[in-house]
Image (tube, coloured by chain):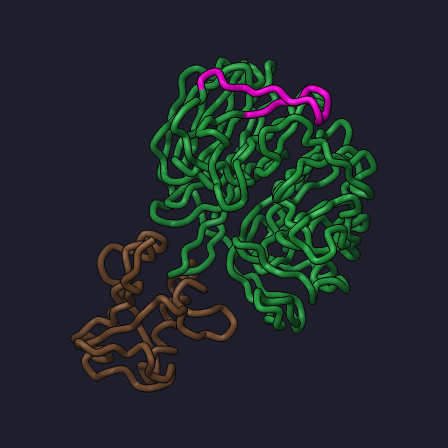
Amino acid sequence: MGGVRVLVGTRKGAFVLTSDGKRESWDVEGPHFGGWEIYHLKGSPADDERIYASQSTSWFGQLIQRSDDGGRTWTPVGNEFTYDGTPGTHMWYDGTPHPWEFARVWHLEPSLTDPDTVYAGVEDAALFRSIDGGQSWHELPGLREHGSAGSWQPGAGGLCLHTIVVDPTRPDRIFVAISAAGVFRTDDSGKTWQPMNRGLRSEGLPDPDVEVGHCVHRIALHPSRPDVLFMQKHWDVMRSDDAGESWNEVSGNLPSDFGFVVDVHAHEPDTIYVVPIKSDSEHYPPDGRLRVYRSKTGGNDWEALTDGLPQKDCYLNVLRDAMAVDALDPCGVYFGTSGGQVYASADAGDSWAPIVRDLPAVLSIEVQTLP
Amino acid sequence: MIRVVLPTHLRNLAHVDGEATLDVHGPVTQRSVFDALESSYPMLRGTIRDHATKKRRPFVRFYAGGEDLSHEPPDALLPDDVASGTEPLLVVGAMSGG
């Protein structure tokens, strides 16, 4: 029987939660990097022992940490993120041009095949890559040089590239999502990019159907069917059946279609999960009830999953990178909250229990399924 | 021997107990001290000064002998007591929470 390792990034450090395949009792290690914001940490699919972590504070800036022993010990690696060439400007909140300025790494996406290759999505929005285990970082500037980039505007959290999805069947194809610009796709390993936002509709924009300018919160796919993408947009849960070329709304009977996370069951490509949040100004669940919603039909028909989750007086948030699944059978589903809880389900969402309840606010959750 | 006192998070990062001690050749300035510090402790690069511009990060301050030296030019000589090792140069995280 295998096990699982849950990697938790929080406002004040990283935690590593481990269990055997039953996923009933858990060991909690941490905090690593206590006092630092850990926006994200993620293990290499090609080497279970290799984990990358993004560590930052406003005082001391950005660090990248690497573990080669499954999160027990860590080594700081390269932390220089310099935009390629003269970075130019994007649009500021007041509509004026604003120079690109590096703030932090939001998301680290290790290569599916090479432990030393890892992508970094950063604020202000750009995509970087390291091919030497994080020692050095180089921008893939084609994204930021897209003709629309001068019009990209930051969302409330900044102009951040927060989601990176690599197509497992076509390694040259990468999807990224930027708040608030939308989804972009490359089919040539990052040299050129195209916006993939047709069908998105955002009522807060002067032109709700504009090609670029949508606040996409998260996208996810199942590796067996990489042309089918699911999206939690600022408002609306969306689905694409043509690798992002077009999108259709699948919010269906959700109590709110605002939210941050979306993820896909490890073994059922049409089973997906979201956590509805009341609104963009009320970042807590509708009716004070924390409910994960599951669709077994790839959207539109949703069921509330409540067993083990608080069903009254619950007013916390679940951020965009704070849900993940394991690859065991039954599939495990995990999410972390702004209240510091990490909830786990070992039965694909039918029932839930907290692994820990009192961590700092959770920013990200990733899961490694161990042999 | 130049003495530098780092804030707790940077001491932990660099695995420094107490003060960092450095050999600085030539004039003792902010630039020469931090060049020597980052040479001895490469993991501190980018945490005190910007990688490219070498400017002090906004929420980091430099004190010595009861004076705030944060706004001194990087090539200005540091006080004699710092150059002689009598006084440490203090690197301080600005007092703010969050």
Q: Is residue A292 visible?
A: yes
Q: Colour of chain B?
A: brown
Please give left or right for residue A195 compared with residue A179 in the image.
right
Range of magenta residues: A292-308
The magenta stretch spans residue B2: no
Report x, y in % for residue A214.
Answer: 68, 51
Residue at the image position 27 percent from the left and 62 percent from the top: B95
Please give left or right for residue A264 compared with residue A281 in the image.
right
Quarter containing the C terminus of chain A = top right
Residue at the image position 37 percent from the left and 84 percent from the top: B73
Report x, y in % for residue B17.
Answer: 25, 55
Please give left or right for residue A15 compared with residue A218 in the image.
left
Quarter containing the N terminus of chain A = top right
Name the one closer to the observer, A250 or A49. Answer: A250
Q: Report the number of discs.
A: 0
Q: Is residue A136 visible?
A: no
Report x, y in % for residue B49.
Answer: 42, 69
Q: Is residue A160 above or below residue A19?
A: below
Q: Is residue A349 above or below residue A193?
A: above
Name the one closer to the observer, A89 or B16. Answer: A89
The magenta stretch spans residue A294: yes
Name the one closer to the observer, A201 or B58. Answer: A201
Report x, y in % for residue B37.
Answer: 36, 67
Residue at the image position 43 percent from the left and 22 percent from the top: A311
Q: Is residue B51 above or below residue A227?
A: below
- Name the image quarter holding residue A330: top right
Residue at the image position 49 percent from the left and 36 percent from the top: A318
Which chain has been coloured green in this picture? A
